[in-house]
Amino acid sequence: MIQPRAVAPKSVRPAEAAALLGVCRDTVYVLMRSGRLRSIKAGRARLIPLTAIDEFLSADEEFAA
């Protein structure tokens, strides 16, 4: 019998992104509106690619250095 593979998500919703970043959900929306955190719209859902979170964190490290 073929076992289904677990697929890692490529994007998260704002609440999940907030948990990953350690900030509140409202802060994630502020970051998206300001253009500092890239997101996409899929129907009514707002999705944040995990690569966008990595880019945000990398940009923040460069800014702090």
Image: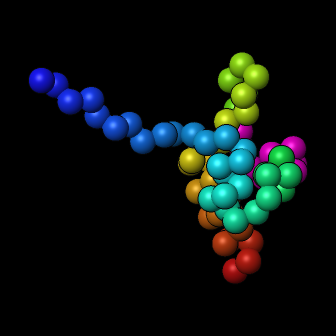
Residue that sits furthest to the bottom in the current view? 65
Residue 43 falls in image quadrant: top right
- Number of numbered tags placed on the structure image: 0
How is this picture coloured? rainbow
Horizontal side of 17 relative to 29 (left or right) equals left
Asked whether 43 or 60 is in front, the reply is 43
The boundaries of the magenta stretch are 30-39
Measuring from the top left, give residue 5's x and y in whole percent: 28, 34
Indicate left or right for 38 with 6 as reference.
Answer: right
Query: In which image quadrant can residue 64 be found?
Result: bottom right
Residue 65 painted magenta: no
**Quarter of the image that includes the N terminus:** top left
Residue occupying the point 72% across, 45% down? 14
Residue at position x 73%, y 33% in the image: 46
Quarter residue 8 falls in = top left
Question: Furthest residue to the left?
Answer: 1
Pick whichever, 31 or 35, lies toward us: 31
Where does residue 3 sit, x and y in percent of width and height? 20, 30
- Residue 55: in sight, yes or no? no
* In the image, farthest residue toward the top: 43
Q: From this viewpoint, is residue 20 visible?
A: yes
Query: Could you tell me residue 12's position as x and y percent?
Result: 61, 42
Which quadrant of the figure contains the C terminus?
bottom right
Counting from the top left corner in percent of width and height, residue 25 is at 79, 52
Who's the residue at 86% across and 52% down the image? 26
What residue do we see at 68% from left, 71% from top?
A: 62
